[in-house]
Image: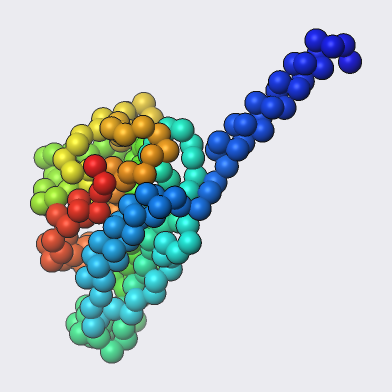
Amino acid sequence: MSRHRWKVALMCAVISTAVYGFYKPHPPTPAEQKALTKYTTVMDKLLDQFRSPDWDEKIDATIDHPTVDTFGDRPMDIDQLLKRTYEVRKDSKRYKTLVEPRLQKNAAEKDIEKKQLEAAMIEDLQHLQVQVHFNMLVVPMITGPDLKVDPKIPGATFVHKDRNNPFSHGVAYVLFFSNGKLGRWEDVNDVYRNFFVHKPDTPFIENIEVRIFGPEDRIKELLHKIDWRQVNTALTM
């Protein structure tokens, strides 16, 4: 290898090592941990309000010993999320009044196609899931937020009923919180794009995305039962 090529190779190796070191995931710094503690304290209390005697709760994911990722395009990001799943209790009022009568009626249905469709709708009534992320660079959705149909929940920048539902049960709602700071819908990419105030990889949480999947009647109940304004107190603006 010529001296010039050797120098170029050495420079590339040094740069690669430096870049890897800069972008290497790391445990939260004290400032990052302070922002995360504030966030999890607020959001855990909010998610606790999803509980009901009608539903069994499973806490699928918590933020416990997270690793901070540095992408260079947003304030801090971590490798964990908050997620909880709820199943209707068979001895609950909801099951006895909404599910059981429809099961009995469907048992007598002769049309196979109608029977299968009704069975799927009955399943939708019994399962719900909520997922929470923060510092979203973009919020992917099938369609953009529409102020004409937005239920205008106090505290939320927007609430959107979307067609993307990987949970497979019920409908999907996206609630976005940024303390009123607006982003931009991009039709070409099918994303709601955010513009951060703070520099990349700094210990700030500027927005929070809450996705709820499940029966629409229960989701609407939660939208009006919970004081969603408290989500904005989890932000470090």
- What residue appears at the point 20 percent right and 53 percent down from the top-left corner? 233
Looking at the image, the residue that sits furthest to the bottom is: 91
In front: 159, or 226? 226
In front: 85, or 74? 74
Quarter of the image where the N terminus is located = top right
Q: Is residue 95 visible?
A: yes
Residue 20 sits in which quadrant?
top right
Q: Position of residue 210 (x, y in %)?
A: 29, 54
For residue 204, above or below residue 73: below
Q: Position of residue 65 (x, y in %)?
A: 48, 61
For residue 90, above or below residue 161: below
Q: Is residue 102 visible?
A: no
For residue 159, above or below residue 220: above
Quarter of the image where the C terminus is located = top left
Residue 76 sits in which quadrant?
top left
- Drawn side of residue 180 relative to residue 136, left or right: left
Q: Please, which colouring scheme is shown?
A: rainbow
Q: Position of residue 183 (x, y in %)?
A: 25, 33
Looking at the image, the residue that sits furthest to the front is: 30
In front: 186, or 228? 228
For the image, the number of numbered tags is 0
- Drawn side of residue 23 relative to residue 164, left or right: right
- What residue appears at the point 60 percent right and 31 percent down from the top-left corner? 19
- What residue appears at the point 29 percent right and 49 percent down from the top-left corner? 208
Q: Position of residue 189 (x, y in %)?
A: 38, 30
In front: 171, or 1? 1
- What residue appears at the point 32 percent right and 86 percent down from the top-left corner? 90
